[in-house]
Image (tube, coloured by chain):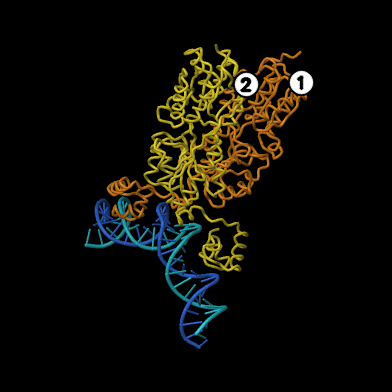
Chain colours: A yellow, B orange, C cyan, D blue
Amino acid sequence: MNIGEIAKRAGVSRSTVSYALSGKRSVSEETRRKIQRVIDELGYRPNASARALANGRTSTIGLVFPPAGNHYTGMQLDFIGSVVEAAAAFDYDVLLSPSGVDSDRSFQRLLGERRVDGAILMEIRLEDDRAAHLAELDFPAVAIGRTAHPERGWWVGLDHTALTAACVHHLADLGHRRIAFVNRPEQLLRTGYESAHRGLDGFTKAAAERGLTVRTYCCGDDAASGQACLARILHDDPATTALVTLNEAALGGLYRGLAQAGRHVPRDFSVTGVVAGRWAETVTPQLTAADVPAEELGRLAVDLLVERLDHPDAPPRHHLLTPPISLRASTGPCTAS
Amino acid sequence: MNIGEIAKRAGVSRSTVSYALSGKRSVSEETRRKIQRVIDELGYRPNASARALANGRTSTIGLVFPPAGNHYTGMQLDFIGSVVEAAAAFDYDVLLSPSGVDSDRSFQRLLGERRVDGAILMEIRLEDDRAAHLAELDFPAVAIGRTAHPERGWWVGLDHTALTAACVHHLADLGHRRIAFVNRPEQLLRTGYESAHRGLDGFTKAAAERGLTVRTYCCGDDAASGQACLARILHDDPATTALVTLNEAALGGLYRGLAQAGRHVPRDFSVTGVVAGRWAETVTPQLTAADVPAEELGRLAVDLLVERLDHPDAPPRHHLLTPPISLRASTGPCTAS
DNA sequence: TCTGTTCATCGAACCGGTTCGGGGAAGCTA
DNA sequence: TAGCTTCCCCGAACCGGTTCGATGAACAGA
């Protein structure tokens, strides 16, 4: 069931079979058909490892994402799905690597053992040792998110700064003066997680610009934390009338906390933020939010990576997306005196 | 940066380097150290493709899941994460294959091109052509879910029949007499999707056993469909006082539909079903449900697969899980006259 | 001193593809 | 008919590992 067997049965040499399959040299129509018939009969498919060894390309891309400890959000899921599908369209397989940092064994496997032709990095940090390491090796990679030095890299990302700022302006326009920001967990912020940082930045600056009174919080990635966080918000400043969140997983808990505190959304309290559209439509009332276009991000990341693989010397490219805020049902005019 | 380079610098032959690394033959302590030093200096790691070609094992397992068209649920996400982590513990990488059916190009790549040593099949159907094909080839695979012929296979799964039956009994014990079943989309049921079938089965039989009046529905995997489905339920039988669902993604919509119809959960209407625990805790009121142990399923699937890979002649094994119902806040005694 | 083990190492073959250089046959021109 | 292309195809080398059989040195026992 290898190429030699095909060659023997078709009465040609191994190289002829190879050329017939790859089309890199001309093969007469007759022998091509003869070879094809044998291949169809035996159901032959060339061995991926041998091919990878011979031509130096694995036809596989690595998707590097942090370990599940802090479990995945719906957005990440959509993203993984779209990456896999987009890669399949280019005949690439996707290898998953649960690596948080440069030194991970899994990360070393991908790179050192040449299991993949290129990589897509999720959950980027402002100072990301994985990204830095890859850049240093000139290894083809595309980041999801911008590091602190975005100009030299290949990446796709959301403009979290602009998105949270847009949320603030939306709330300010509705008359809200005292608002809270619910970020991802503190550990992520501390380690320089990009969206947490830039989101916080955009929020803070826009709030200052509009002269708002704000408080910012970090919140665990689960409903219970969201509920506790909301209790804290109302305890710290009962006059708070709105919040902006990046934390998809906590959203259900935030809503529950509001209900528990007797605040009706959106009559007494407005909620908005940056979350996946599908998720925003799941909660009641449906969330007015900047919808994270996870599928598009995944597709674009694959497009960029494939381009980089096909043209090793191409100059860095990137896509910065700023999806608009979708008005749904969770924000309304401020009714506080 | 290949094994020959290491050998040259260490002043030994390539085979000696190989044996020093694998330990399959003894190498003197002195040369071993010499080799190790060169390796550390150069940061050498053996090429995965070459190794795979030589010893016939890729150290990769394939995770076969359906394309994202019908998008992923939280349960699938948790499952993917746990598979990747469990596999990493055994030094296996995970290759994603978005294949719904046997004939998919992606599926053929995995198998025909020998990209993986074994496979885990998600989203199994009662008559599953992928599973049948793999079984015929005696290809090491573990299914998530039982086909119609579970005795001959390797699989891990949930006893959906028992779980939905438990939900029915729970509701019947609370006095509910008219209940609805909200299944996954009709297309999945029609194509023989296992959980949809067995779940429906368990529901129907248990309801008959308890003499309940029931209606069963299929529902799209999104909030809007859930909302529409609930409207249909109350339209078809306004006296319905409870529902059982397998449809995680529709849950938010079902809740919204109930709120819209003025039915308070759990006072006027009870909701229960089979969903991931994390998700059940996200909605308000928190869902009383049989929590899908996605992480455990993933771990067990990898355990079984690795066992099968290590012992090719081992007899088939499986794990059928029946998690208990977690009592939360979405069910209560029937208050209808 | 000779023989028989044991230990450490080497060279060569092999895994299954790809690719390069060369050569025979056919066709064309002079 | 010699000389030159062009078209197909073949054989051999190579990718980077693993593994088997052989070899030589060191050492033991007789």
Which residue appears at 49% of the width and 27% of the height? A165
- Please say if A167 is above or below B151: above
- Please say if B142 is above or below B226: below
State whether discs 1 and 2 lie on one chain. Answer: yes
Element marked by disc 1: loop
Q: Where is residue A87 in the image (x, y as percent from the top left)?
A: 54, 46
In the picture of the structure, the residue carrying the numbered disc 2 is B288
In the picture of the structure, the residue carrying the numbered disc 1 is B238
Q: Which amino acid does label 2 sit on?
A: Thr
Closer to the camera, B335 or A205? A205
Left or right of A139 in this view: B269: right
Closer to the camera, B243 or A331? A331
Q: Where is residue A317 in the image (x, y as percent from the top left)?
A: 46, 44
Element marked by disc 2: strand
Q: Position of residue A23 (x, y in %)?
A: 54, 62
User: Which mark is on residue B208?
Assistant: none
